[in-house]
Amino acid sequence: MQVKKNEILCAIGPSNSGKTSFLRVLNRLNDLTPNFRMSGNVLLDEQDIATLDIENIRKRIGMVFAMPSPLPLSVFDNVAYGVRMTGIKNKRQLSEAVEAALKQAYLWQEMKDRLHESAFKLSGGQQQRLCIARTLAVQPEVILFDEPCSGLDPISTAKVEEAMLKLKETYTIILVTNNVKQAARVGDRTAFFLTGELVELDQTEKLFTAPSDHRTDDYIRGRFG
Amino acid sequence: MTSIQRQKIAFALLFLANLLVVLPVGLIVFIIIQKGWPAMTWEFITDIPRHGMREGGIFPAIVGTIYLVSGAIIFALPVGLLAAIYLSEYAKDNLLTRIIKLAIVNLAGVPSVVYGLFGLVLFVSFCKFGASILSGSLTLGIMVLPIIITASREALESVPYVFREVSLSLGASKWQTIRHIVLPNAIPGIITGTILGIGRAAGETAPILFTVAAFYLPQLPSSVFDQAMALPYHLYVISTQVPNVDPKVTYGTALVLLILVLFVNLIAIIIRSQFRKKKKW
């Protein structure tokens, strides 16, 4: 399958259908799992990611996890973390990067006076947007979202979705979601996974109105899963 | 019997078990303080032993113990921490690793006299350090290594896995992740292990018996190749080897040893709580 620049590609499917595994293949996070096997190739700008430097891959392909997962640091240090790891120590450069990233994640207004508080004091929705800002600060090309709204209330979800729609102007987004409606709202194209198999990949509109595989139809209508 | 009655009986049993644990410890501390306090004079702490160790002070033994414990920790903490990092972060989970982990846990239970003999053979004879502070410190260090490794490993492994994933997903290398995320959050646990190690090193007699301890040495050691007196061994000597020692001297020595260990622990606990305060989750 191909992912196009500046699109939001959604992956839907029931639990254990391989959506998250697929996502974690893309930034080679599965390499951490013992006994993990994969076949096939992932190409980023025509280059096989298995042959590229792993830290570099993860800078170019950012990831936002399912549960809000701030690092045990302050708000500022959370966002600055990835930038610092590239070796940048200049304070002005760091605060510029942090400010820009927080603005992109619609968090700057809320956070500008709380930068040195612990990230664990934020609400769940704020934490998740902080995680998005943290990923953006590294200036990736692709962002992987792994069910980013599964732990959030509807208002926080709306904010995260709004951020994603804005972000696709600059980034390429792959969104794994358990929420079929979310895929319908933000996805340009949608892929349906079932028991580790990619059943169907099409324009979101077409997949939701006239799916070509009956299993897709069943899932979307809520007949199983 | 109603469930409330049963609950009361269970509480009573639990309380009793606690009492059984606390009471002997409290009693030991109480008796040592009661009998040792009269000996606690400035002279006792700062003077050398006199009159066949029946009078005077125990200053050389205090200094000797401080040297030995410091030496042991200076050796065991870096080595133990690095080993723990390797075992918990880098070593692949295979049979060999599991055997090594099991061996380390079991080493913590080896009788201390075995470490003493080991130190005698390796450091005193083979390395030709002689009976010296160096030999004694290294022997004590090896004895506390398993404690430090086990505690550090547990501390490292208790840092949530998701922190590592997040750090790596942001492009940090494995070492950067360990250095900036895992280690800072494991420090309280590592310090706890070190406290346990210090307590054990300060109190053991057997490992220093053959490797460093002097029966009677009324001056301070001048280098790491000197012999030294040490509190636990001094306590052993004056309570079994020297006739007609005033019990208050014996208990006084025990009290000083107790205070010394408590004092070191207190420092470590303060450091640990400073780190805990910084902990943000």
Image (tube, rainbow, N blue to C red):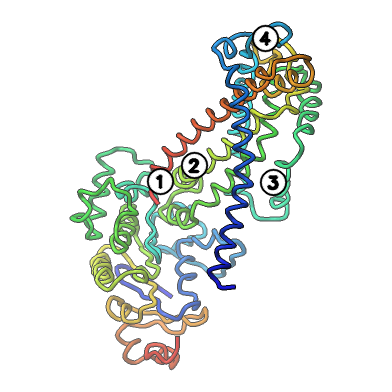
Q: Earlier in the sequence, mark 3 or mark 2?
A: 3
Q: Secondary structure at mark 3?
A: helix
Q: Position of residue B19 (x, y in %)?
A: 60, 47
Check whether the beta carbons of the residues at disc 3 and disc 2 lie within 8 A of each other.
no
The disc label shown at residue B55, or none = 4
Q: Quadrant of residue A213?
A: bottom left
Q: Nearer the viewer, residue A181 or B69?
A: B69
Measure how far apart labels 2 and 1 are at the Cα level: 9 Å
Q: Which residue is mark 3?
A: B105
The disc label shown at residue B245, or none = none
Chain of residue at mark 4? B
Q: Quadrant of residue A9?
A: bottom left
Q: Secondary structure at mark 2?
A: helix
Which is more foreground, mark 4 or mark 1?
Answer: 4
Check whether the beta carbons of the residues at disc 1 and disc 3 lie within 8 A of each other.
no
Q: Earlier in the sequence, mark 2 or mark 1?
A: 2
Q: Residue at x 59, y 49 (%)?
A: B18
Q: Which residue is mark 2?
A: B188
User: Which amino acid is tagged 4?
Assistant: Glu
Measure how far apart labels 3 and 2 are at the Cα level: 20 Å
Check whether the beta carbons of the residues at disc 2 and disc 1 lie within 8 A of each other.
yes
Which is more foreground, mark 4 or mark 3?
Answer: 4
The disc label shown at residue B279, or none = 1
Measure how far apart labels 1 and 3 are at the Cα level: 28 Å
When the figure is inspected, residue B142 is found, relative to residue B237, above or below; the finding is: below
User: Which amino acid is tagged 2?
Assistant: Pro
The 10 Å Cα crowd at callout 3, few under 14, some 14 to 19, many 20 or more, is: some
Q: Position of residue A92 (x, y in %)?
A: 24, 40
Q: Secondary structure at mark 1?
A: loop
When the figure is inspected, residue B167 is found, relative to residue A197, above or below; the finding is: above
